Structures are given as C-alpha cells and as structure tokens.
Amino acid sequence: MSIDVETARKVAKLARIRVEDAALPGLAEQLSGILTFMEQLNEVDVTGVEPMVSVTPMRLKRRADVVTDGNIQAQVLKNAPEAREGFFAVPKVVE
Amino acid sequence: MTANSLTIVAARDALKKREISAVDLTMSCLTAIDAGDGLNAFVWKTPELALEQARAADARLAAGDAPAMCGIPLGIKDLFCTRGVPSQAASNILKGFKPEYDSTVTTRLFGDGAVMLGKLNMDEFAMGSSNETSCYGDVVNPWKVDDRKLTPGGSSGGSAAAVAADLCLAATGTDTGGSIRQPAAFTGITGIKPTYGRVSRWGIVAFASSLDQAGPMTKSVRDAAIMLQSMAGHDPKDSTSADIPVPDFEAALTGDIRGKVIGIPREYRMDGMPAEIEALWQNGIEMMKGAGAAIRDISLPHTKYALPAYYVIAPAEASSNLARYDGVKYGHRATLAAGDGITEMYEKTRAEGFGPEVQRRVMVGTYVLSAGFYDAYYNRARKVRALIKRDFEVVFAEGVDAILTPATPSAAFGLGEMADADPVEMYLNDVFTVTVNLAGLPGIAVPVGLDAKGLPLGLQLIGRPWDEAGLLNHAHVLETAAGFVSKPEKWW
C-alpha cells in the first residue's frame, strides 16, 4: 500500500497535526514504508481467529456506584494553559 | 567503593544494621548524579525531596521494622507522574506539567520508604529504541569502547544509564515493546517486564495501554525481586490490574531449577544474527543445562509477524491515548494567530509539541484505525496477536517452564548511527522482546557477557503468566552461572 500526498494530508488532518505542504511528500514516503512493513501480516491465515481484545482473560471488576473522588477543581485546572472562572478556556468554538 | 555503587541488597542490609544512613547513601548518589551530567540521564533533579525522604527513612529505620526499600535511592523514569515534580514523558507537549498526584508505582515505592533522586530521561512518550527522540536530548551509554558515544537503548535509556553508571541504586522503567529489557541489555544491568496486570499503570503516561507495563531496572536479579515486590499488586484505579496475591519474589530465589524445562525457540535464530549473539545464546543454554534444567527445542511459529503486528497495534493505541494532548488541560499550547479557531489550536499545538517519531506513530495509528482500513490493518493485527499468544500457550501447556532467547540483535550502537535509517530499521531492535508484550508475559533481561569490543550483551528469559517468581529464579541461576561483574570504566 502506497500513501500519496493527498492521503498523507488527510491523515495529518485526522490526527490534528499541522504538516506543512513541503513536508507532505516525505511523510507520505515514510508512512508508505511502515505500511509496507505491516503488509507481511497478509501472509498469515487468520481464518476463524477472534481478534484479541483482552491481554489476560479476566472479568473487569465491578464496584459500588458511589462517588470516590471530586471537589478538586483547583487541582484539575492547575496545569491548564488557560483557565478562567473555574473553566478551561479555549478559542471561541461557536459563533 | 562509594555507597552509590551498592546494590539494593547490600544497601538494605547496611541500612538495617545502621552501618550507613539513608541520608549518607542519598548524598553519595546526589554527588554521583552531579558528576554524571555528561550522560544526560537525569533530566530533573530533586535533591531537597530526596534528602527529606532520606531523613524520614532514617527515622523509620531507627524505629525498626522498615520495609526492604526503605532508604533506597532511586531514579524515576519521566513517564511516571510524580506530585509537584515535572513529569513530561520527555515531550515538549507536556512542558511545565507538574502533576497534582503520584502514580501508583511511585506511591507504593515512597510508601515503602524509597527515596526519589530525580526524573530520568527517555524516548519521547517511550517511543524509541535509542533514547534519541527525547526533548531533553540523547542519553549517553556509560559503556564506551572507542571515541564514539553509544546509545543506552530505549525507551528507558536514562534509567539504564543511571543504574549502570551507579548514579542511583535502581530505577523504574516501562516496557511496551522491549523498553526495559533492550536498554538493560545494552548497559549490562537487569530489567524485568512483569506480566501484564501485575503492576498498576495508573499515573504512568500511557503509550499503548494493552502493552505497557512498568518494572524495575537494577544491578542484580535479587534487587529486581525486591523492588518488584514493592511495585506490584492490585490497584482499583487500574481496571486491568490483577487482583491476585503477589508472592514473595526474593524467597523464590532458591537457585534450584533442576528438572525445569527451558524452551529454545527456533524462530529466534534470525538470518544474519551476529555470531557473538549466537554464541552467547549457546553459552546461556549450557549454563541452564549445567544447573540441571532440561533443554527443549520449541517452535513459536508466528514470531516473524510480531513486529508488524506490534507496529499496527501500538501506534493505534497511541493515537487514541495521545489525543488528550490538545493544548487545553495541561502542557503546551501554541501561540495562535488572529482568527485561529480551536482546530488550528489543536493542529499547531500538536505539531509544535510532538517530535517527529511521535507524530509519525500517531499518524500511522490514525491511518490504521480510519474508516476502510480498520479491518485490513488493526483487526488483522489483533488476530495475529491472538495467534502469537496461542504459540506461547501451546508450549507452556506442553510443560515448558521458561524460554531462553537473546535480548537484543546486537550490542549498543553509536548515537546518530541510525539517523538516516528507515524508521523500520530502528523497530528491528525490538525483534526478540516484542512478542512478550503482545502475549502479556513476563520477561527479564540478564547481562551474560561482553562482545569482542567489550560491550555488554544480555539474554532474555520469558516466563509463564504470573510466574515472575519462577522467572526470577531462572534468571538468578543464569546470573550466577554467567558471573557478569563488568562495569563501565568512568570517563564522564
């Protein structure tokens, strides 16, 4: 599978990483190389094999539906690049 | 010999007998760290915190009944969140991030009285095999045989270099595809990746959640047993953490492996494998045989597909995990131009904050998870992963107790030597270690010998799920038989 410049642009967009136009051909080439490497997987017969979803076969534990944490607004916001009036602040989202 | 070069065992015993104080031991490490800046292993030093913890440890030791890790000075990989201390995963995107909490692992270690000397360098977000992707710059391997500076391996390169250079008694590491075992092998130390679920992942910056596991990096197998004891155990805050008893790992080091069956997987005999690695492996087989173990040739037929499966699954999980770095909640936010909206904020922040390898993996992950490719790549990789796990289950069911393989395909290489290589070439470093993460098994790297140039080489033992105790005992036997005592000559 070879990735063209347009696909590289689309992947960068989906990943929300700005890639300058000049860097797209190089990126496409690298991604193509990695995907070619992955294509070895097509040699494996996976008929009837269930995809692995859990590393060790165990049931997720359940716990009582009670509040175990909270009331730490200042701590939550402490590392925010911008916080105002108890909220995370971001550029305007809705016109 | 100064106190910083002690093992955990020796320090524990000396501390208990009050032959040395935790403060003196810590001071000895802090001095070594300051003299070791040329290695670039420690990226954030915490001497005040260390001395405060050491004083508390001394009080506890004086009162008697202190845990084994009490007063032991450690380095902590930058991937672990440590309260009030920068925890950046060696990434610019977490610049300035000081967690308001401690990871479960550091909480447990500190609860047992361990001392934190500072934070250790690593590959950015643990993505790398040479510690060259860090925002703090390369770590240098204390081992040196010519005028080249060598890589300590990665991603736990700072941990490996710090332990090998006696800047600390031991360090925490994490292992997603070999990131504890490969650097341990490159620096002549011991590193164990426990069974998936044995150690809590809570508070460790996530890379690939179904593969990540933390473990100790130490100067001996016994030290690894002692430190893992403190790190391991159930944690309700990690839903994949196993609620099963943790055995006494040190007590398991009986040195007796008579009658145990050691599997030698034929698929690990790679084309073009250096003769030295082959000879090392053969020596290891003889050592296990000499200790009374039965050697059995085994087959793990899907080994060849482990790396390509890994490089689908790990980036897929990384692309999801790293979506949280958006310039909103913590870390870096790009300076925006007039009229930039939230999408520009995300895109610019992530382009500035992530290094090239992280960007590449996030984009690969995004691609393999995208509509139309999910089945072809991601689901297929998960099916192959199931087959890789099954390979191991079959040999364990047939009575194999542990599996012996090389740890790395070569000794440490020079920093910068892979700069022009294809990303895939760097990935080949994980060829012997990555299967273990995919199958969720415990694996340990033990230093066994030196190559012709004088660089350390290690072997890997792979154990049954949850059998770290047995695995450590096998490793202890290998360590004893190998008698590896070489240390890097101080040049830094």
Image (cartoon, rainbow, N blue to C red):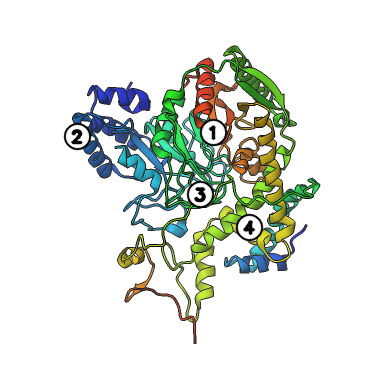
Q: Which residue is more in the foreground, A28 or A66?
A: A66
Labels 1 and 3: the sequence-earlier one: 1
All told, the count of numbered labels is 4
Labels 2 and 4: the sequence-earlier one: 2
Q: In this figure, which residue is indicated by the disc labeled 2?
A: B59
Give the foreground label among 4 and 1.
Answer: 4
Name the kind of residue labelled 3 in the image: Thr
Cα distance between the residues tagged 3 and 4: 22 Å
Labels 3 and 4: the sequence-earlier one: 3
Q: In this figure, which residue is indicated by the disc labeled 4?
A: B365
Name the kind of residue labelled 2 in the image: Ala
Tell if the residue under mark 2 belongs to the same chain as the one under mark 4: yes
Cα distance between the residues tagged 1 and 2: 45 Å
Residue B269, how many percent across, how many down?
Answer: 72, 29
Residue B220, how many percent across, how many down?
Answer: 45, 25
Element carrying mark 4: helix
Report the disc number at residue B148.
1
Residue B212, how many percent across, how many down?
Answer: 53, 46
Q: Quadrant of residue B445?
A: top right
Cα distance between the residues tagged 1 and 3: 43 Å
Q: In this figure, which residue is indicated by the disc labeled 3?
A: B240
Question: Image point 52% across, 24% down: which residue?
Answer: B475
